[in-house]
């Protein structure tokens, strides 16, 4: 289980996600935001989502930590993992989704469930993410590599603020796509678009989680 003896329901979801391998998958299944709003207790998160806390705790307690893939724990290796697994992937996946979304929006413009505005939302987040990732790659991550521990509160606060905006983007995409729900008879392009958008959601949540809940606290004064 986790590294603390505090009951699961009293722990913050961000702490659980950081300490219990496989917990992020459970949180995604239950619709719990563990990345941008990981500072609430499991009990509060369950209340906000109108979930059964016992069912949620049971799912977490049933996890086999040895069976879940884990990101590297050493700081430099973790930074490398974030850059290769998430930064590089976002730079490939978002432009592809923009192109696919424009196609679906144009072909199915008359459909009442067409994802109108999705391509524009993706275009916006691509620009914001690129600026965000460049700041990390050119400024924050090199500073972290130079020191095994220390305080970098000001740039980290800025990155956390960016992450909040990324979370708002995910909420906007969920709204546009009706939570990635395909209409009856959706074409293959539409299916591919929503599958890709859902994967982007999972990737971006894991990306933010690793920074907010695992990497950043190592360099904050309150950690």
Image (cartoon, grey):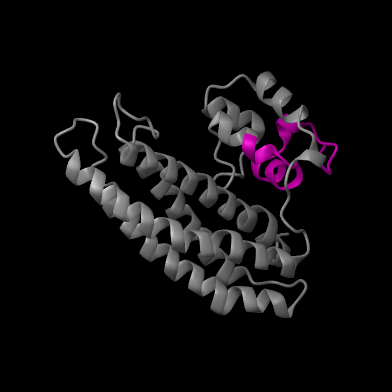
Is residue 36 in sight in this rendering?
A: no
Residue 146 lies in the magenta-colored region: no
What span is in magenta?
1-25
Q: Nearer the viewer, residue 178 or 212?
A: 178
For image coordinates 61% across by 19% down, the residue present is 52
Give the image location of residue 50, x and y in percent.
Answer: 53, 22
Q: Quadrant of residue 217?
A: bottom right
Rendered image quadrant of residue 8: top right
Residue 153, x across and y down, in percent: 62, 68
Q: Give the residue furthest to the left.
A: 110
Identify the image quadrant of the N terminus.
Answer: top right
Q: What residue is shown at x 18% (from left), y 46% (from top)?
A: 106
Query: What residue sits 57% from the left and 78% below the top?
Result: 139
- In-image side of 91 versus 190 (left or right): right
Instruction: Give the mark count.
Output: 0
Q: Is residue 45 visible?
A: yes
Figure quadrant of the C terminus: bottom right
Say whether residue 75 is left or right of residue 87: right
Residue 66, given in percent of the width and then of the height, sits at 82, 41
Q: Position of residue 154 (x, y in %)?
A: 57, 71
Q: Height in image: 161 above or below 18? A: below
């Amino acid at each position: 289980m986790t590294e603390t003896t505090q009951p699961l329901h009293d722990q913050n979801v961000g702490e659980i996600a950081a300490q219990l391998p496989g917990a992020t998958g459970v949180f995604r299944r239950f619709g719990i935001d563990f990345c941008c709003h990981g500072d609430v207790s499991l009990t509060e998160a369950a209340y906000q989502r109108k979930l059964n806390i016992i069912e949620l705790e049971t799912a977490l307690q049933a996890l086999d930590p040895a069976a879940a893939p884990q990101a590297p724990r050493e700081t430099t290796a973790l930074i490398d993992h974030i850059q290769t697994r998430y930064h590089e992937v976002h730079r490939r996946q978002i432009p592809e989704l923009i192109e696919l979304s424009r196609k679906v929006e144009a072909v199915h413009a008359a459909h009442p469930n067409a994802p109108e505005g999705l391509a524009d939302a993706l275009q916006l987040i691509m620009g914001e993410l690129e600026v965000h990732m460049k700041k990390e790659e050119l400024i924050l991550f090199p500073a972290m590599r130079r020191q095994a521990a220390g305080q970098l509160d000001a740039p980290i606060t800025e990155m956390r603020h960016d992450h909040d905006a990324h979370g708002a983007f995910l909420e906007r995409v969920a709204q546009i796509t009706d939570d990635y729900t395909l209409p009856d008879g959706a074409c293959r392009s539409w299916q591919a678009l929503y599958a890709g958008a859902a994967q982007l959601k999972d990737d971006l949540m894991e990306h933010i989680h690793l920074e907010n809940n695992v990497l950043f606290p190592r360099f904050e004064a309150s950690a």
